[in-house]
Image (spheres, coloured by chain):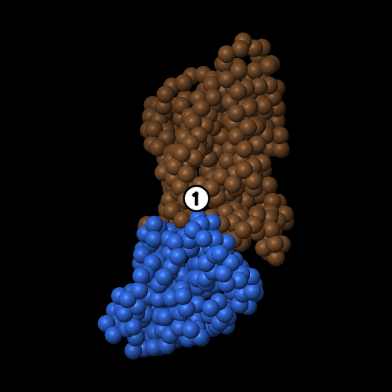
Chain colours: A brown, B blue
Amino acid sequence: MDTILAMVEGFMYPNEVELQWSILIVLYPYITGLVAGAFILASLERVFNVEAVKPTYRLALLTALAFLVVAPLPLQLHLGHPERSFQMYLTPKTDSAMAMFGFVYLWYLMGVLVLEIWLDFRRDIVLKARSSTGFVRDFYRVLALGSDNISERSLEIDDRVGRFVTILGIPSAFLLHGYVGFIFGSVKANPWWSSPLMPVVFIFSAMVSGIALVMLVYMVVSWLRSKPIDMRCLDTIAQYLLYAFIIAFSLEMLDLIHRMYEADESFKSLDFMVKSRLFTSQILIQIIFGTLLPLGLLALSQVVRMTERARKNIYATAGVLTLIGIFAMRWNVVIGGQLFSKSFLGYTVYKMDFATREGLLPAIILMVAPFFILWGLIRILPPWGIEEEPPAAADPESC
Amino acid sequence: MTVDRRQFVLTSGKYLIMTAAATRAIDFVMAGTPEAAPGYSAFDHWWAMAIDVDLCIGCGGCVRACKEENDVLLEPYFFRTWVERYHVPEGDIEHPVVDSPNGGYDGFPERYREGDGAKNFFVPKLCNHCAHSPCVQVCPVGATFESPDGVVLVDTDYCLGCRYCVQACPYGCRFIDPRTRTVNKCSLCYHRITKGLTTACCEVCPTGARMLGDLKDPSDPIHEFLRTNMVQVLKPQMATGAKVYYADLDGSVR
């Protein structure tokens, strides 16, 4: 702390010197964004009947679930008293944006995602329960929740209910992540956050990151299974990524231009921060390498005729850059919003610990964990059908 | 009906445990009633503070008294009240030079001279006990609340330590106490004012620059203070209903 105090530039209110929200709170919008984005991509196939992205439909749902399970963990780790967090369910304060998180989360997890996955995989689960013995049979029987009817009529009902859940799921995904944006956007004390555009920017950047993630996971999983990548599918996803990215970037630029043109009392302070303490993470990583470069690459793949191999390379590069760029965006929102003083007269620094409760190590573990969960989910519910067992599932590290 | 000894012990034991649990539950539900102090009715008061900027000499007595009275950690990033020194070059209210070494706890080392072409003055800060507190609004469990007598308080047995309120306060008045991992802030010395005393900071101020006032008491001197001075609250654009009124506050103060 004393070293931080020594690095304060200008004047901070004394209680402001220490940052309140750490890298764990950066992960929170990042992870929920990946969930919402992956789900929205999956919904495209289901609701709008986009046949081309069908090969990624189930994979996207499982990816969303793997990340959603991890989403509340950074929040829990960050709380001073995690053991009291259930109070948010028992005695929520209805006019607190944060109090609603638990309900939105539970609704999305149980009411939408788990239900949709169950409906979609029910036939496979029942078949697996029928064809296996011993513990495996019991396990799949439990997963089937006692259902054994996979007649054409019952599957049709599954499909109709599933479609209804997906239709309900799209606004829910928007709610889940738009709401995260609202948590920041509604803090009037903080001009870096306070903006009605925040939830919209969050939703579109979530779509961008989720689509990029599913695209990469699909490529890696196909490679690991030694299966050919469906290029029609990949091209379509890349197209969606480009469109979502254009909207997200336009919204962010709109926000920026608006701030620059209005130049209110906070502008000089924030402008200086972006040009100094946030220069690397905002200008270089987020805007140049994480947005303009992948946008350029994706646009290039649309206008120039390229070989399959070149397109794959471009998509993979653009996807990785996108994920880094969106992470940087969350970082700049959360950490950037705490580096300047609310007196607009000074700046502090964020010193990240390594092996502490809110350090880099738990953040890395939390970021890698969803890939292990996804690996487990793919083993239990192979997206490509339960009869055809894959030789090896996704390697978590390589995603 | 006959009851054997075993059954009697079991049944009465059950009732005993249930009664204790119920008592505990009622205690839990009724916790945090601010007017619990005998003879004090929260509904008869509406607390505020008046600060005369011209009278503050930056001695830091209030900061020391507050830390002592409220067991606030002595490190220089935990303050329920602190004092800022402003140095405003002529006419340049957008670029004041502000410092607050150790929150003013040790007073202020000499830095500016009379007649250096600038205004120099001190501004004591504390929680504004806003009537429409953004911090109270965001608390997910209602652990921080506005009491009926207009004081923003924290129930530390309920606080999750999520720090959302710290982010929501426009004035930087809140901090997390590392000992309890819950939020901490000025309570307007609630344990004192409900017993008819003034706050620790007002008590020790040698020039009377700070004055606790009860806006519901017509005979309280704060009414005259508000009538006879040009007063302002901090960051009025935030519309928080701040109740710390400053007399003669310069436009450069934020």
Q: Is residue B198 above or below residue B253?
A: below
Q: Horizontal and vertical percent for residue A270?
A: 55, 48
Q: Residue furthest top?
A: A305
Q: Is residue A394 above or below residue B178?
A: above
Residue A195 appears in view: yes
The residue drawn where x is 58% and y is 67% is B116
The residue drawn where x is 64% and y is 74% is B110
Quadrant (top left/top right/bottom left/bottom right) for the C terminus of chain A:
top right
* Residue A231, quarter of the rendered image: top right
Q: Which residue is mark 1?
A: A266
Three-letter amino acid code at the position of disc 1 = Ser
Q: Horizontal and vertical percent for residue A51?
A: 48, 19
* Left or right: where B46 falls relative to A276: left
Quadrant (top left/top right/bottom left/bottom right) for the N terminus of chain A:
bottom right
The residue drawn where x is 59% and y is 74% is B104
Of residue B168 and residue A117, the one placed in the foreground of this image is B168
Of residue A247 and residue B253, the one placed in the foreground of this image is B253
Q: Horizontal and vertical percent for residue A257?
A: 48, 36
Identify the chain of the residue marked 1, using the numbered disc in the image.
A
* Residue A237, quarter of the rendered image: top right
* Left or right: where B146 falls relative to A354: left
Q: Is residue A72 above or below residue B176?
A: above
The residue drawn where x is 42% and y is 80% is B211
Residue A92 appears in view: no
